[in-house]
Amino acid sequence: MKYTALVTGGAGFIGSHLVELLVKKKLKVIVIDNLSNSNISNIKKLIEKKKIIFIKKNILDKKINLSKYKIDYVFHLAALGSIIPSIDDPVKYITNNFNGTLNILEKLKKQKIKKFVYAASSSCYGLAKYPTSEKNPIDNQSPYAFSKWSSEELVKHWSKVYKMPYISIRIFNAYGPRFKTKGAYGSVIGVFLKQKLEKKLLTVVGDGTQGRDYIHVVDVANAFYLSAKSKIKSEIFNLGFGEITSINKIVNLLMPTKIINIPYRPGEPYKSKANISKIRRLLGWKPTISFEKGFNDLIANINYWKTAPLWNKSSINRVTKNWFKYLK
């Protein structure tokens, strides 16, 4: 039987990798994305080859019609990201992320969903001690964090009332091909690569000794797929590599001539590290791509990034095709 998967935000960084994996797994895929924070080039070939159905809509759009599809799995990734912009415009973030989630859930209320997999955020832990487990207290430090956590609570409530099995995955720091490089608050790796290619100073927040738990986007996609196909339900999982990589380590790998230090950002932890024992134990998932491997491969292919904007280019396929061998 060929199952159907709905992916919101499927033209984005994580979403497009997940869509590719689902297509490889022979699922019929429907993508909803308004392209405000993503790029059609990420899934253009799949659309042209009629491998997926693409719906250009905002998740807030009440006119989204999903009743004509028999949807088995839902992967809800569409959301506004970034902490600092959410502080500047909290209404926008909470409206989009919470109400958008509510709208999608309402559209699916009468369908017999096998699993609703929600892309949550580790930002809900705030300035938590590490390694951070799912039992750590919630300490939302920004409207963005609150919008993602409250949407997670909404998914849990919907599951209870309408008998819709769910898994929520609190992602730590995803990186890899197609990550966002635009703006001051994109992925630090993407920002660094863009600055290096433009021969600009690398902007290091603080003294660079702070660190993050980086998980490759291919491992993220595999975790989402495994969550959907497993018999496990009504669980929350942390998703990271389980190791800390310092900002200075990334800087050293890029070997810049000069850097410039900028002030710390409010509401962000000094270091983060995911306790991933739960997802390993219950789902049998484990990360397969070390940071050294993932980052060094990006550097090795850096020449492919020189001829076009990092976030919007057809040449990205020459880089990302090497990652397909990691898809399980």
Image: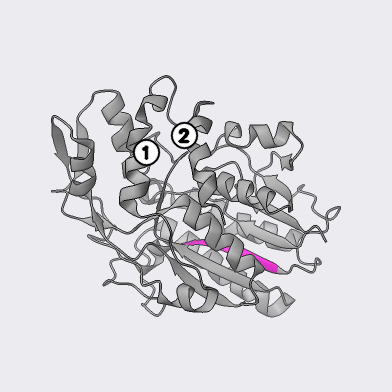
Q: Looking at the image, what colour scheme do you see?
A: one colour
What type is the residue that disc 1 sits on? Leu
Helix, strand, or loop for circle 1? helix
Task: Provide residue 123's location: percent of width, then percent of height.
Answer: 38, 62
Q: Earlier in the sequence, mark 1 or mark 2?
A: 1
Q: Residues within 10 Å of mark 2 (few under 14, many from 20)?
A: some
Which residue occupies the foreground of this view, 19 or 132? 19
The quadrant the C terminus occupies is bottom right
Q: Quadrant of residue 98?
A: bottom right
Label 1: how many Cα within 10 Å (few below 14, some 14–19, many 20+): some
The quarter of the image holding the N terminus is bottom right
Residue placed most toward the observer, 290 or 305: 290
Q: Is residue 61 visible?
A: no
- Judge from the rendering whether residue 232 lies leftward or rightward of residue 238; answer left or right: right
Start-end of magenta stretch = 115-120
| Up/down of 222 relative to 166, above or below | above
Q: Residue at x 57, y 61 (%)?
A: 224
Circles 1, 2 touching at the beta carbon (< 8 Å): yes
Image check: 296 left or right of 325? left
Compared to residue 243, the image places residue 290 above or below, namely above
Q: Position of residue 88 (x, y in %)?
A: 38, 46
Please name the residue that numbered disc 1 is placed on: 298
Q: Indicate which disc residue 319 carries.
A: 2
* Image location of residue 180, percent across then percent down: 43, 39
Instruction: Verify whether residue 59 appears in magenta.
Output: no
- Residue at point 54%, 26% (across, down): 314
Where residue 115 appears, as percent x and y from the top left, is 68, 68
Q: In the picture provided, is 288 more to the left or to the right than 256? A: right
